[in-house]
Amino acid sequence: MRAAIVCAISAVLAVLSVLPAAAQSPTLDSVKKRGQLVCGVNTGLAGFAAPDDRGNWVGIDVDFCRAVAAAIFRDGTKVRFVPLNAKERFTALQSREVDILSRNTTWTMSRDTSLGLNFSGILYFDGQAFMVRRALGLKSANELKGASICVQSGTTNELNLADFFATRGLTYRPVVYERLVEVLGAYASGRCDAFTTDSSQLIAERTRLPDPDAHEVLPDLISKEPLGPAVRQGDAVWSNIVRWTLFALINAEELGVTQASVEADRESSNPEIRRLLGTEGDYGKGIGLDRDWAVSVLKAVGNYGESFERNLGQGSPLKIARGRNALWKDGGLMYAPPVR
């Protein structure tokens, strides 16, 4: 009998040893105690993060911050935005000045492995391009031999620019500034022949020039620029919260769940929708959130497609086509793991 009891106890302990521990996150605890999320964003980039005429932050990066705040607090307004330039953005995250960096930042190996950071996914698939004056009559970036190129320091753009010309054996003259507004100003005043940065950024900055139609973005993309939110390493639960907030936005679009329909969709008979919205199962528990956390996210900002169209797409001044950022089933690259 005693041997049987010992065996039974051992079996129970073995089962308990493989059960997941309760979700614990020092970052989540800190955010809850503070009562708001602190999010690092661009100092001002149309479509991604910029104050509107009333001083309210808007943009797809801003929407993502609000989505994370809504997942935690059921309120997307409980977030404070900290504008950061390219040079200071990583230090701000490393030093805990911000809880999350949602600032059109490229996911690279070195940033993901040597800065003490983890990227949580891709919010926007981009690529580096060049803007030039139409009067030059250029059709391709390969025609920029010997040109002076304005570029922002401390970015992947500066490194990609050097790679592009080196691999083609072409000469160029870099005109480097620390702040994006300085880069744009230098280009606008004629101190360089071309301005290079991410394609989406060029489209946004073009609208700020005195005569936007006098300038064009060349069709060549010279790099891969997967832009996404980043968090500090060492807090797996927090990383999961940020990652699955992004996945929830993408899955919601794929399933047709919108900001307007989310409440009614809680009664859907579709098991995928029911799992996403917490009607079936309790998938929020594993990341320290309520079972219906995704409902709050979608009520706050809508699904990924809604955020894209509002900030970057046809409903915005930029009118950027979905292209690579369309859902996978529509020929794009947006794809999220399932909730189950």
Image (cartoon, helix red, strand yellow):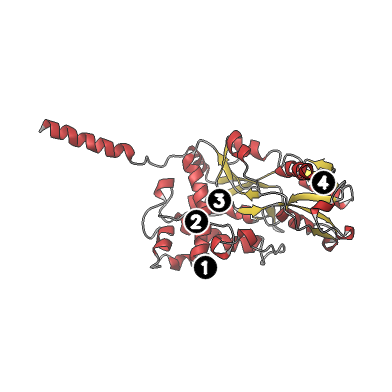
Name the amino acid type tagged 2: Ala
Which residue is disc 3 drawn over?
A: 78
Q: Who comes first in sequence, dot 3 or dot 1?
A: 3
Question: Of tags 1 and 4, which is closer to the observer?
Answer: 4
Q: How many marks?
A: 4
Residue 300: x percent and y percent?
54, 59
Q: Residue at x 52, y 67 (%)?
A: 260
Dot 4 amino acid type = Cys
Q: Amino acid at mark 1?
A: Ala
Residue drawn at point x = 26 percent, y = 35 percent: 13
Q: Position of residue 32 (x, y in %)?
A: 49, 44
- Residue 111's quadrant in the figure? top right
State which mark lies toward you, 2 or 1: 2
Name the secondary structure under disc 1.
loop
Mark 1 in CB contact with mark 4 (< 8 angstroms): no
* Label 4 vs label 3, nearer the camera: 4
Q: Mark 1 highlights which residue?
A: 260
Q: Residues within 10 Å of mark 4 (few under 14, many from 20)?
A: many
